[in-house]
Amino acid sequence: MFKLWLIPLLPFLGFLINGIFGRKLPKLVINAVAIGSVVASFLWVALVVGPSTDWGEHKVQAHYFTWIQSGNFNVGWDFAVDKLTMIMLMIVTGIGSLIHIYATSYMDHEGGYYRFFAYLNLFMFFMLNLVLAANYLILFVGWEGVGLCSYLLIGFYFHKKSATNAGNKAFIVNRVGDFGFALAMFLVFINFGTLNFNGVFAAAPGKPVETLTAIALLMLVGAAGKSAQIPLYVWLPDAMEGPTPVSALIHAATMVTAGVYMCSRSSVIFLHAPAAMQVVALIGLATAVFAATIGITQYDIKKVFAYSTVSQLGYMFLGVGVGAFSAGIWHLMTHAFFKALLFLGAGSVIHACHGEQDMRQMGGLRKYAPWTCLVLACGSLAIAGFPGTSGFFSKDAILTAAYAHAPWMFWVGVVTAGMTAFYVWRAFWMTFWGDYRGHGKPHESSWVMLAPLMVLAVLSLAGGFLFNVPEMLKDMFPEHGEVPEEHMLMAISVAAGLIGIALSWYMYVVNTELSGKIANALGGVYRLVNDKYRVDEAYDAAIVEPIIHGSSAVLWKTIDQGVIDGAVNGIGARAQNVGGLLRRIQSGNIRSYATWVLAGSVVVIILMGIAGGVR
Amino acid sequence: MEFLVITGVKLALILFIFMTALAYLQWVERKVIAHVQVRMGPSRVGPHGLLQPLADVIKLITKEGVLPPHVNKFYYLAAPFFAVFMALISISIIPFGTDITIPAMTIGGTTFGPYRTMMELADINVGILLVLALSSMGVYGIALAGWSSNNKYALLGGLRSSAQMISYELPLSLAIAAPLLTAGSLSLRTIADTQQGFYLGFIPHWAIFQFPAPQIFSFIIFMIAAFAETNRIPFDLPEAENELVAGFHVEYSSMSFAAFFMAEYANMVTVCSVATLLFLGGWHPLFPASLGSNFIAPLLLAGCGAVCLYHGLHPARPFDRYTLPAFAVIFFGLAGLMAFPPTVPILMPIFWFLAKLLFLLFLFVWIRATLPRFRYDQLMGFAWKFLFPVALVNLLITGFLVALAS
Amino acid sequence: MDPLFFLLFAFITVACGVNVVLQKHPISSALSLVAVMASLAVLYLLLGAEFLAMAQMIVYAGAIMVLFVFVIMLLNAGTEATRGRSWTATIFGIPAILILIGALAYFMQTGMPQLGSVKFGDFRGGGAYQVGYALFTEYLLPFEVTSVLILIAIVGAIVLARKELD
Amino acid sequence: MDPAQIAGILKQGAVPTSWYLALSAVLFVIGVAGFVLRRNIITVFMCIELMLNAVNLSFIAFAHEHKQVSGHLFAFFVMVVAAAEAAVGLAIILTVFRNRSTLNIDEIDSLKN
């Protein structure tokens, strides 16, 4: 009807063309194919699918073919579009288009140009699949596919050991989450007999709470892996090894929000499992605070934004956990705007400084790259929740909902908001104010890079007015209670953001010595935070090392060498003995072999005749 | 019983005409080549050398059949007869006219007939496949002759011939398959009958002109492959006398030698007949009877008669005074027979069939007089690298067009 | 007529088949095999398998056996050595063959009487049209697979028969 | 089968299907015998073709018996496989002959032990 298949297929065709013929094609053609396919699917979504549907009542559902039919397990290749999907589609294709355009300039001088765009298009294909899916398995296909593309793109500079390691880390950590998600799907199938969203959500209210809680928690494990929540967030900062457009598209705007999307999509299950909701909220909040503290101490500009992404994802989970799904989705959207902007701006900065990522080697860039400075200021205002910007509205919606759920969550959220404003503006001041501390002469980026940044800047500033997501989604999710002192809460959170900005201005523009003193004063605590709480090391010691040693001691030395090899060798030795006898049959003479075959056939024929097999 | 008698009569007639024709084909070939090369050709035995084939036959029969001591006797003797057998047997399924009805007649109180019969020995519905099968069996005769002669030239000739015939059988079969798609049958008679009729009243419905897929390329491929299948110049490497002495029949003499020649000419006649039936509309005339195609034959023959008569009255050589008027009488008689209404429906298809067949045979002779010989690697390369792909593409396009049109 | 034709060609088939095994020279065996195939083709015709009969002649007699003859000529294979080293084949083989004959004869005797009989012209489903139709509808996949098989065989044969891998 | 029966068949003009099957069996056994007893590798190979032909005959006889074209297709596929087999097999024989200059299968026994 709306040819929903066209939406993911266009990027997939782009992937095929660029992936297969890209090596031979000129850059112009690669650009045209890569951008064209994504823009075409954006236009299809925005101009055809979007306006032509009455979104009030029903949703568009399409069944293309039966993918798996086994017993009563029936999975079709089904797509469905409702308002939630529509918002996600707009975000994914819209931001995707902008980032594709940006990347043509950013990646201009990189090797493997066609490969980059092929992967990027493949990512778009899987992401759109994920968003369009009408059952958990198709969603899972997209889920795994974006994971694959994430892995490929993190390791894009495969000649760098750190990049490939980061890719592996992302892939393996995600496997843990995916394992949880797969278990959740099994449970869903066992309990509901289907994986279709419609069927599951229709039947969910009647199921026991324990079952739903188990399913929701397992889904949360999956979502935590994909959306970088505690305890599985460790891969996301490392993922910044990939090219910056990848960080912007995959690790800020779209893929990492898949977990939030999935939880919102499964809102029916979560709403009937209050305990799970509580866990979601706690994990979200903890992640938000935790990541924010690390963000304060980082010097690599992309790492700062990476931790900020983790923190903001925590916010979204907080929103989901306190029942404000639409607020979470709203924040997902505004975050996609300003975080994509921040990452792309960071890319522009890195470009300006000839590949330097350490903020200590930057400074004073506002003179060299005024446009970048301007757009990054917009993005930073938005993330700090400056009144009127997009971030202000969505963050406020989440915090209000949190207050309604439990006031202490609100206060922790406010502190985090202050920290967020602080470290983002810290990065801003360090980069654009002061004197240039790096080498070479920085330069402004090309207009191809700046144009998407400006579009995103406008969206970051005005996104809250343009798209009132809770209004759009109000009949999809249940209402949550009104909070009386809403304006009060708003003022508090705005104040926290402004204090953060002011503090950072004071520490990094006015009195630049202060930060060093504070760091010295805090000593061990500062070093701990700067080392990201040594979580990676802890995981190494607690999980990775025991597994390696345990496997080599138990599995390899004892079980493999002792039991399995022993059995195999024992069988081998017996076989050798028997074979020594049978060897005499193997004379190497074809005619004697033929005779054995003949004798065997005669026996078979006679047996068949006796058994009456002739008839 | 009736069937057996009629078949016997037809068999005898066809065999007699065919064997005579084979012998005279040799004469035609020599005459044509001679005239191409501005020579006289055979002219000693009989008027214009017309008795030359007879003389050749007598010579070959009376010559000593040499049996070299080093040969494998059984196969050496069997090979030429195998070859000629396979070559002759194909003619039995070639239709050369429409079915005819012999009216009932009463002889001595017993009424015979009426008889209705086909102008061929056997109409089988996989006829074209049988032709292919028999032509592929023809390899054995040559290969065995080459091998059993126990002579390296002969062996090389035999091996070359088998390789060549197997290779060219592929484009040949593919070229045959294309017109079969439009005809939709494997029976030679049905195939010829599908080519009846005219476009716009004058373009014949022959396969080479036929809608939707004119088979002109199939025809060319078929003729090229047919030259190779019959081991004719420019593909006569198995018997290339200046490199292999005479190839597979170097050791043969007398009747066994003649048998190979007979096989070669019989094969020529067969492939030309098949080409006529598949591509040139069989016995269907070049233009419709309404435009006077029935008058072509009598006019042509009468013209020949007139020329003979004129030269007889103004003789270049003394004996022409007697021989040429005699020929003129024969020609006029034939022309009269062609114009005689009761015989027209019987003779006209035969005339058109023979006209096309003779044209193709003339083509064979003409090319022999014109072209040099291929080198062996060129020959194989040509078959596999050019002819085979072209035939495949041609078949593909034909199939596509036929599918589009249906 | 039918039984006479059958008996005639069955006799030729069996005689030539025995000849294949008894002849000392491979080329005689090969030509006997050609005769077996030709008379089998006639039997196919009697069974109403016109297309198969012609395919038998073209493919088996016209192509495969020519290949055999070709190879025999190329290798100039002489008569085979009479003495071999496999006693297994002789000691167990001949009795096994005899048992096989006995078993087949016995089972045929007991299992066959309910079968019908063959009259020429009874079955008209073996023409090129019917075979082709079945081939391109019901058996399309096997048909395409065989084309791949043949491609593999061609590649294999060329690789094997190349002089040297230089 | 007694003579009266055979006379009846001759008179009736129809051949029992079982005769075709018997012929097929006889051919097959001849092929087996040749395969086991002959020493020339090419002859052995030809005996395999003989067996395949015997099987084809029974396929076609059964196709007639059941008035179905499927049997013909089986026979057709057997032919195709036989063609492929002959091509590869003869190539192998050529290679073996080139390397060991013998066609006696009793001498080609490197796979022993």
Image (tube, coloured by chain):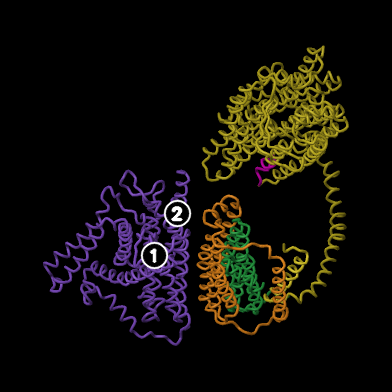
How many numbered dots are placed on residues in this image? 2
Chain letter of disc 2 in the image = B
Quadrant occupied by the C terminus of chain C = bottom right
Q: Position of residue C11 (x, y in %)?
A: 57, 74
Q: Which residue is mark 1?
A: B270
Q: Amino acid at mark 1?
A: Thr
Q: Is residue A405 above or below residue B65?
A: above
Which numbered circle lies on residue A147? none
Chain letter of disc 1 in the image = B
On the question of residue A531 being in view, the answer is: no
Q: Amino acid at mark 2?
A: Leu
Q: Which chain is green?
A: D
Q: Which residues are magenta?
A: A150-158
Q: Is residue B145 above or below residue B118?
A: below
Q: Which chain is purple?
A: B
Real-space CA distance between mark 1 and mark 2, rounded to the nearest whole angstrom: 18 Å
Element type at marker 1? helix
Q: Which chain is orange?
A: C
Classify residue B405 by image quadrant. top left
**Horizontal arrangement in the rendering, residue B228 relative to residue D81 (left or right):** left
The shade of chain A is yellow
Q: Which label's residue is closer to the chain start, 1 or 2?
A: 2
